[in-house]
Image (spheres, grey):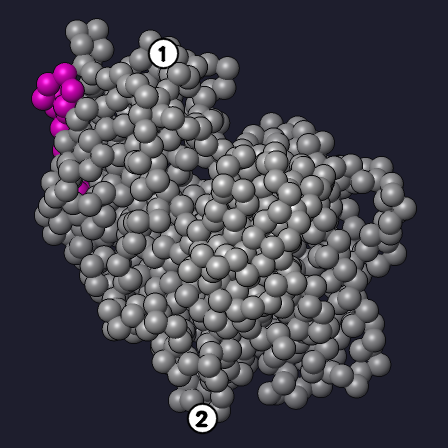
């Protein structure tokens, strides 16, 4: 274990306290150091005044200073909020100034000073709102653009600079500062109190990239974490005139020099520094002409990804629900209640789902599985980390067991965006959903069986997990015998978009793991029958592309082959690989074994095929689409949430922005999506698939696909930003408004702008693209487990 991790474990008492924030390498720190060429104030006049809206008070102190104050909670919801309080706080207070269609295009920063003087507020934060009525309207119809949330240090005077590069600002009509009253710990009296002063528009000495594949000319794009010793190692720029690059040690010694390749790829033209042949472990930086990168490591996977694993676990621990997390919150949500047949359950535990405080059983279950899978790899590497991962994983097990009402019923989810007072029976209580769906029971059964394989029979939890897994599986089978695949989709459940193909893959995976213990002939027959059905959902004949390549191996949503399988937010792509791995490693002597292996290989080849569409970036291209998929209403409606009738027309536009590869078929680099955008979950699930198949088929190229998704997230993207807070360089504040910034958080991910198919990463943060998400951090751990596992 390296010294940095040893130090982290020491100061956090083995991650029983959150890791302190390191803001030195943050994007905000970088933005605040920009040189300002000119500035103009935004101040109150007789014509332009600060106005107030909402529960609290807005007071103008002088022309350049205002005060915004509100209680932490109120006894009614805002007008228009749902009566059950689902996904809402106690209301907003807004200070705003109307602008007369002002043109701000000559300025690229909005700067202001803010002093937070709050009482009992868990995470003081404020949201900047901007409205534009020019060529591009802001906010957009999905209410994603024009909002930026800032987490504050209480009792400190701070200067905040919002980067406006790329933001439509040709006709600004309103500037607003908004606070959300979202409660306090156990209902203690609380007050939000902010003083805002010296609001300026500023022009800096540099511009920044928010959209496109081509990086800034003065940026060398590299993996901030580093590279595995025996794997491809690329860094690249664009538009730079240089012949050679060098790998340099910290002491200034040049240890490797080679030629730069100028390559035109599917996305743009690049100057590529390929140092794959350099295999000396150590810490280095890259030098091209006068440009240099920050330091990175070259080492084995175990060492390379250990730091981010520890930080990811820190985020998971810090998101514990129903537990007093030091320096964040006390015991919480004891008045989120699930009811079933007269029985009441307090629905807290596990981990908060996202930037809000919602809770999802399946999300927690899958994160729990990921924790144990990485723990399994640490078992013979580091006992301290192994023990800590097991401990955190058992917190997840506790929640899964707790939510079980029996007879297949579980408390499954709750939409919560507030700190409740922990007292049952008053207005701020929240209700949890309760369901008996076979699909969720199949998942829970598989999760418990997979965990039991990690902890082994000597662990005190082993027999409990085995028994519950069998129960869940039999409940699932019983309910499935009545419903089949016609389970009613349930809004806000993360299983909403489940296709028949994903369902079958889950059943094969779960059933196989259960039957490793039960040895039941009927279950075995069902597994093999369902595997045959799953392969019917796969493209096995092949589609002839315009370049004569025969493309096969990908999955459709069902055996009709009308709609290809895609994920655009919550992704379970890896369940296909889990199904292959489970059945191939369990039934090696079966007469259908060669069919399963061939199907796994075809699927693996499809994953590899997609890599060329984003080279030299490693980001996994989303895949192939059919032109008329939007006409299948049943699948379209569960794949795309909160859309209107325009979505079907936009589907065609987004497809045409991709690459046409055959009559009626397009390759998309990013998903077709609308309100919910951000592809980290999508690419990490694909990375998990590639990692599983790489180990199963002993194919290093697939392991490199998995590594590549980690590298994309940790900085090897066009924006040269790490998307894990506290790891790498230029990590930005994310939409983490409830609990504040946490080391190890990962957002939903890079999106596209409107209907394009190129990366879009604005400096504004908002749900969904920059909202932190526990599921993505869990997937991060599960991918690392696969790359460490590869021998």
Read off the residue under disc 2.
458
Q: Is residue 450 magenta?
A: no
Q: Which residues are magenta?
A: 55-73
Give the residue drawn at x 70%, y 76%.
583
Q: Earlier in the sequence, mark 1 or mark 2?
A: 1
- Residue placed farthest to the top in the image? 47
Q: Of the numbered discs in the image, which one, if any, rests on residue 203? A: none
Q: Quadrant location of the C terminus?
A: bottom right
Read off the residue under disc 1.
102
| 1 and 2 marks in contact (CB < 8 Å) | no
Rendered location of residue 144, percent (x, y)? 44, 33
Q: Residues within 10 Å of mark 2 (few under 14, many from 20)?
A: few
Tell me if residue 630 comes above or below residue 457 in the rendering. Answer: above
Give the residue drawn at x 26%, y 69%.
12
- Residue 317 or residue 405, whichever sits in front: 317
Give the residue drawn at x 23%, y 28%.
112
Task: Describe the element under mark 2 as helix, strand or loop.
Answer: loop
Answer yes or no: is residue 239 visible. yes
Task: Describe the element under mark 1 as helix, strand or loop.
Answer: strand
Give the residue drawn at x 54%, y 79%.
449
Q: Quadrant location of the N terminus?
A: bottom left
């Amino acid at each position: 274990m390296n010294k940095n991790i040893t130090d982290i474990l020491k100061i956090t008492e083995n991650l029983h306290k959150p890791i302190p924030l390191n803001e030195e390498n943050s994007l905000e720190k970088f933005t605040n150091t920009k040189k300002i060429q000119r500035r103009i104030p935004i101040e109150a006049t007789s014509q332009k005044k600060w106005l107030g809206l909402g529960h609290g008070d807005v007071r103008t102190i002088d022309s350049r200073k205002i005060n915004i104050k509100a209680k932490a909670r109120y006894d009614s919801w805002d007008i228009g909020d749902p009566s059950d309080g689902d996904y809402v706080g106690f209301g907003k207070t807004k200070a705003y100034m109307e602008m007369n269609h002002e043109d701000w295009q000559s300025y690229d920063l909005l700067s202001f000073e803010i002093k937070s003087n709050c009482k009992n507020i868990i995470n003081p934060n404020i949201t900047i709102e901007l409205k534009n009525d020019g060529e591009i309207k802001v906010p957009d119809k999905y209410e994603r653009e024009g909002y930026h949330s800032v987490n504050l240090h209480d009792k400190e005077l701070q200067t905040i600079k919002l980067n406006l590069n790329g933001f439509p600002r040709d006709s600004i009509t309103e500037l607003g500062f908004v606070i959300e009253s979202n409660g306090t710990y156990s209902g203690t009296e609380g007050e939000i109190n902010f003083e805002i002063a010296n609001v300026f528009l500023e022009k800096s000495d540099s511009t920044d990239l928010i959209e496109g594949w081509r990086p800034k000319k003065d940026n060398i794009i590299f993996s901030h974490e580093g590279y595995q010793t025996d794997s491809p190692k690329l860094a690249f720029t664009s538009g730079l005139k240089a012949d050679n690059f060098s790998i340099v040690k910290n002491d200034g010694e040049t240890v490797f020099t080679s030629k730069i390749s100028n390559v035109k790829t599917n996305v743009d033209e690049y100057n590529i520094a390929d140092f794959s042949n350099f295999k000396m472990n150590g810490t280095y930086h890259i030098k091209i002409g006068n440009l240099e990168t920050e330091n990175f490591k070259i080492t084995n996977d175990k060492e390379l990804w250990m730091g981010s694993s520890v930080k990811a676990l820190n985020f998971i621990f810090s998101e514990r629900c129903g537990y007093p997390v030091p320096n964040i919150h006390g015991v919480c949500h004891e008045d989120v209640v699930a009811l079933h047949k007269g029985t009441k359950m307090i629905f807290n535990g596990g981990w908060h789902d996202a930037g809000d405080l919602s809770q999802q059983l399946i999300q927690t279950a899958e994160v729990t599985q990921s924790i144990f899978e990485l723990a399994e790899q640490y078992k013979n590497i580091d006992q301290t980390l192994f023990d800590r991962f097991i401990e955190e994983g058992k917190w997840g097990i506790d929640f899964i067991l707790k939510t079980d009402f029996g007879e297949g019923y579980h408390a499954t989810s709750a939409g919560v965006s507030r700190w409740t007072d922990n007292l049952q029976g008053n207005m701020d209580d929240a209700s949890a959903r309760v369901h008996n769906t076979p699909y969720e029971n199949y998942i829970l059964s598989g999760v418990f069986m997979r965990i039991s394989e990690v902890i082994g029979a000597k662990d005190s939890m082993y027999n409990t997990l085995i028994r519950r897994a069998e129960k869940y599986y039999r409940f699932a089978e019983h309910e499935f015998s009545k419903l089949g695949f016609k389970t009613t989709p349930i809004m806000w459940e993360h299983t909403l978009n489940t296709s028949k193909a994903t369902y079958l893959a889950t059943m094969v995976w779960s059933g196989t793991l259960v039957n490793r213990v039960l040895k039941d002939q009927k279950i075995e027959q069902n597994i093999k029958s369902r595997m045959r059905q799953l392969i019917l959902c796969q493209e096995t004949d092949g589609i002839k592309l315009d370049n004569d390549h025969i493309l096969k191996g990908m999955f459709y949503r069902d055996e009709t082959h009308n709609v290809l399988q895609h994920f655009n937010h919550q992704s379970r792509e890896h369940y296909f690989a889990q199904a292959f791995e489970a059945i191939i490693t369990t039934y090696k002597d079966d007469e259908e074994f060669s069919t399963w292996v061939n199907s796994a290989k075809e699927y693996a080849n499809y994953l590899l095929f997609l890599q060329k569409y984003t080279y030299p970036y490693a980001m996994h291209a989303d895949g192939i689409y059919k032109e008329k998929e939007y006409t299948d209403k049943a699948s379209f409606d569960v794949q795309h949430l909160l859309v209107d009738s325009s979505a079907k027309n936009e589907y065609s536009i987004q497809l045409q922005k991709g690459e046409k590869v055959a009559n009626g078929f397009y390759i998309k680099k990013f998903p077709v999506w609308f309100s919910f955008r951000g592809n980290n979950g999508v690419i990490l699930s694909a990375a998990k698939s590639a990692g599983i198949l790489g180990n199963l088929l002993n194919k290093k190229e697939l392991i490199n696909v998995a590594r590549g998704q980690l590298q994309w997230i940790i900085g090897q993207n066009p924006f040269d930003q790490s998307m894990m807070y506290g790891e790498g360089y230029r990590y930005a504040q994310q939409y983490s408004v409830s609990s504040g910034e946490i080391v190890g958080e990962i957002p939903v991910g890079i999106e596209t702008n409107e209907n394009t198919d190129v990366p879009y990463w604005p400096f504004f943060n908002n749900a969904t693209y920059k909202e932190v998400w526990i599921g993505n951090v869990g997937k991060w751990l599960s991918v690392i487990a696969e790359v460490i596992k590869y021998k």
